[in-house]
Image (tube, rainbow, N blue to C red):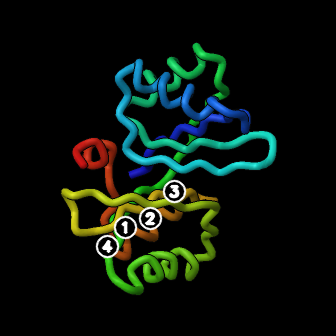
Amino acid sequence: MKIKQISVFIENKEGRLKKAINTLSEANINIRALSLADTSKFGILRLIVSNNQKAKEALENKNFVVKENDVLVVEVPDEPNGLNTILGHLDNEKINVEYIYAFVSNKSDEAIVVMKVENVDKGLNVLKRKNTNILTKTDINSL
């Protein structure tokens, strides 16, 4: 299943990350996973949250630019070669991984990996055929 991720564009200035996170906190949004990539002028805060619509509205009301896009969230064996195997499945089908980040949960023995691939539908089908455990929004919110 594809998961909607939100990306928040934030100025690379003191306090802007805190303001974005505080906005989500005030809206009672639970952050399940996040990644921050930066350049000298701005950053992209990528988030998997408990309620995308509510998060998006809260952030936009505070003048943040927010975009939604589809990502895959998969369980990866927490062992050497675990991630390499998953990436091999995608590579064999010529599916490029644009970015990736991970998190762990005390409710799972597996690592949880969020990945943005060029063709999400094709990537989803490949990983399903390879019996990869692909998480749903409900799965993520229960971690």
Q: Which residue is drawn at 54% across and 61% down?
A: 100
The residues tagged by marks 3 and 1 sit, at their Cα atoms, a distance apart of 11 Å
For label 3, the residue is 121
Q: In the image, is 129 to the left or to the right of 70? A: left
On screen, residue 133 above or below 64: below
Q: How crowded is mark 4: few (under 14 residues within 10 Å), some or many (20 or more)?
A: few
Which is more toward the observer, 56 or 25? 25
- Write the residue at 42% across / 69% down: 127
Q: What element carries label 4?
A: loop
**Left or right of 133 on screen, residue 99:** right
Q: Do the residues labelled 2 and 1 touch (CB within 8 Å)?
A: yes
Measure the alpha-carbon separation of dots 3 and 4.
Answer: 15 Å
Q: Mark 4 points at which residue?
A: 131
Q: Which amino acid does label 1 sit on?
A: Lys
Residue 59, picture quadrant: top right
What is the residue that sits farthest to the bottom in this orientation?
A: 80
Image location of residue 23, percent across then percent down = 49, 22
C-alpha distance separating marks 3 and 2:
6 Å
Numbered circle sitting on residue 128: 1
Please, what is the three-letter code of the amino acid marked with disc 4?
Asn
- What secondary structure is marked by label 2? helix
Determine the residue positioned at 37% across, 72% down.
129
> Between residues 77 and 129, which one lies in front from this camera angle?
77
